Image (cartoon, rainbow, N blue to C red):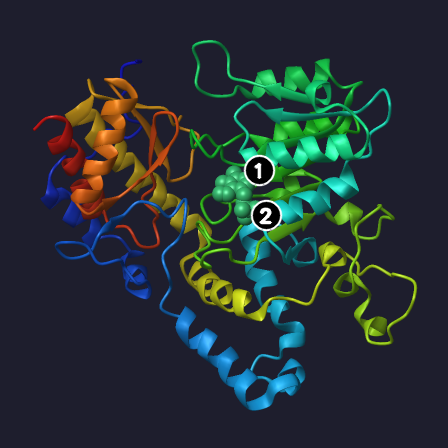
Amino acid sequence: MATLRPPEDSSFTATLRAARELDGTDRLAPFRRHFHLPAGRAGRRIYLCGHSLGLQPRGVAPLLAEVLDDWRQLAVDAHFDATRPWVDYHRQVVDDLATLAGAQPSEVVAMNSLTVNLHLMIASFYRPEARRPAILLEAGAFPSDRYAVDSQIAWHGHDPKTARIEVAPRDGEGHLRTADIIARVEAERERLALVLLPGVQYLTGQALDIAPIAAVCRRHGIPIGLDLAHAIGNLPLRLHDWDVDFAIWCSYKYLNAGPGAVGGCFVHERHARAELPRLAGWWGHDPRSRFDMPDGFRPMVGAEGWQLSNPPILSLAPLLASLSLFRQAGIRQLHAKSCRLTGFLEALLHTWLANEVEIITPPERGCQLSLRLRGGRTRARRAFEALAEHDVVADWREPDTLRMAPVPLYTRFQDVYRAADALRRILRP
Ligand SMILES: Cc1ncc(COP(=O)(O)O)c(C=O)c1O
């Protein structure tokens, strides 16, 4: 196990009092009150699991009640006469999603779920040829991405065993190097029909430096897409400027939109009117003639042209509630707090547990820290379970990784202190 490297920011004091002082000067602290915090054995649990499922904003229930009321009282007329008419309901989230994605409003749409959107995007952007059948992924890609990619490769009559190319960290290293990804794209450019990378790697929490990679892909005419499951709402993004072709995300993690919430999709402006092949549905058809029920599909301009079905209003209402908090707080301010909060966690682990813990997350990250423990899987797994007994909610990823994410919208510095202190007491009783 590598020794714990010194924290980026060593200006923290490892006391509860110092943590409370940091809370006292935190201008984003009031946002915590906008969330329901899960109850624990003693008081509230310390929730470090927003990278898996974000907490419920208090604004969700009233918005859901509004939809249910409109449905009860107006029935079908609610499509046009509801407090927020259902026919355009999905458009209310567009501006805020665009801000989080670093995109123009016409480049984003809320629809489906992540893996469905990934399939829709691959259907449009993966145009393999006999000599160019390959898709480049990172070796640790989330299983759903691998399954989607393999099934698409096979769907086109190619062999995933040879056409899925993976780029991995170097031997003995835990993170991908940008230069290695670029070198791999260069080396495989004749065979590559698509590159798919994460914004933030789900296991290690590494944030990838997308712009230079996208530039190389563009130079060689290789479409590039991003899985932003762990990036959106966690880090400020600049999808438009990075010039990626597409991106997909889910909204139940950092976007706090609830289990199975409606996902999202970015399609770069340069494809807004392009005649790309796509899997079409009536909600992607030009709304001016959608209800004329015409025969020929005429796609809407922009990302909305990839919609299939009429939007899930009950799933959009929580997203709407949550996005208003992001709008008020600002993703840059949230990120600034996130750096401090996660830096504090790193500093505490370094001060107390330098010989016990390895942080596998590099400094290029959002709020998640992924840990391995000296003593390997069994000890780490036991520590994870013991944390739950201390009312600390972290999560576990096989084979040996403990993930903790102090989400800046609802986590306090004193929570981080208590969580690190609990781990200290578990590991060094
Ligand atoms: C990185 C990543 N990609 C894809 C998915 C799959 O998302 P969904 O079940 O919404 O399709 C997840 C789910 O946690 C994920 O973390």
Image spot of residue 175 (x, y percent): 47, 21
Task: Name the residue: 69% across, 39% down.
Answer: 243
Mark 1 CB lies closer than 8 A to ligand 1: yes
Q: Is residue 150 left or right of residue 357?
A: right
The C terminus lies in quadrant: top left
| Disc 2: which residue | 114
Residue 290 position within the rendered picture, expressed as x and y whole percent measured from the top left:
82, 71
Query: Can see residue 285?
Result: yes
Q: In this picture, is 304 found above or below 364?
A: below
Nearer to the camera, 70 or 161 = 161
**Amino acid beneath label 2:** Leu
- Horizontal side, residue 423 vs residue 139: left or right: left
Q: Report the quarter where the N terminus lies.
A: top left
The residue at the point 21 percent across, 31 percent down is 383
Q: Which residue is mark 1?
A: 144
Q: CA distance from mark 1 to mark 2?
A: 9 Å
CB within 8 Å, label 1 to label 2: yes
- Image: 147 above or below 56: above
